[in-house]
């Protein structure tokens, strides 16, 4: 399903090769300590209405935990397990000056739904989700056809 969605979006070259990641990403990025529980992560995601959190540990190592990871933890009966157990590493990043098409291709090749966005200094500046890309394509499509 993810592959079909991204392949459809890639077909819209007007948007995919003209809109930059920084214009569609979510920012600021919400974080959670790696030592917090999965339950705490789920509560924070619900409160903030977001689908992922950047995970920070004592050595400032970074990872990401997503809604999917939360579901997996609950399915295993371990919502009180620490976040570190379900954190995805390494982070897969894209530069904020990249085009949405590049982001969609990277998501497709890595089979993921979110990318961590970095600025020119390599610092994290946002998160880009497949939903962000879909909404950008939808908005541009409506604008093109004046709907």
Image (cartoon, grey):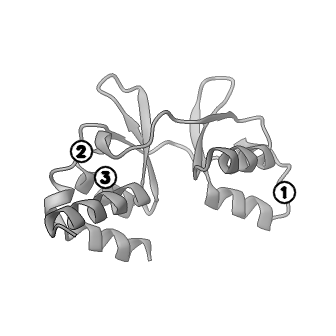
Between the C-alphas of marks 3 and 1, the distance is: 33 Å
Q: Nearer the viewer, residue 91 or 129?
A: 129
Q: Position of residue 72 (x, y in %)?
A: 71, 63
- Is residue 21 toward the left or the right of residue 36 in the image? left
Q: Secondary structure at mark 2?
A: loop
Question: Looking at the rendered structure, which numbered label has been put on residue 103?
Answer: 3
Residue corresponding to mark 2: 20
- Is residue 146 toward the left or the right of residue 21 in the image? left
Tell us which disc is closer to us: 2 or 1. 2
Q: Nearer the viewer, residue 144 or 104?
A: 144
Q: Position of residue 66 (x, y in %)?
A: 60, 53
Q: Are marks 2 and 1 in contact (CB under 8 Å)?
A: no
Local packing at callout 1 (Cα closer than 10 Å; few below 14, some 14-19, many 20+) is some
- Occupied quadrant, residue 117: top left
Quarter that holds the C terminus? bottom left
What residue appears at the point 49 percent right and 42 percent down from the top-left corner?
Answer: 91
């Amino acid at each position: 399903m993810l592959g079909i969605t991204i392949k459809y979006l890639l077909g819209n070259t007007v948007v995919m090769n003209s809109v930059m990641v920084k214009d569609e990403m979510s920012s600021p990025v919400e974080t959670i300590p790696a030592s917090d529980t999965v339950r705490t992560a789920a509560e924070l995601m619900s409160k903030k209405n977001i689908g992922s959190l950047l995970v920070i540990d004592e050595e400032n190592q970074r990872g990401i935990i997503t809604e999917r990871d939360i579901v997996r933890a609950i399915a295993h009966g371990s919502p009180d397990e620490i976040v570190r157990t379900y954190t995805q590493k390494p982070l897969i990043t894209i530069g904020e000056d990249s085009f949405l098409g590049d982001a969609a291709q990277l998501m497709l090749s890595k089979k993921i739904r979110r990318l961590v966005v970095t600025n020119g200094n390599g610092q994290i500046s946002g998160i880009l989700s497949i939903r962000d890309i879909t909404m950008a394509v939808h908005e541009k499509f409506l604008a093109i056809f004046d709907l």
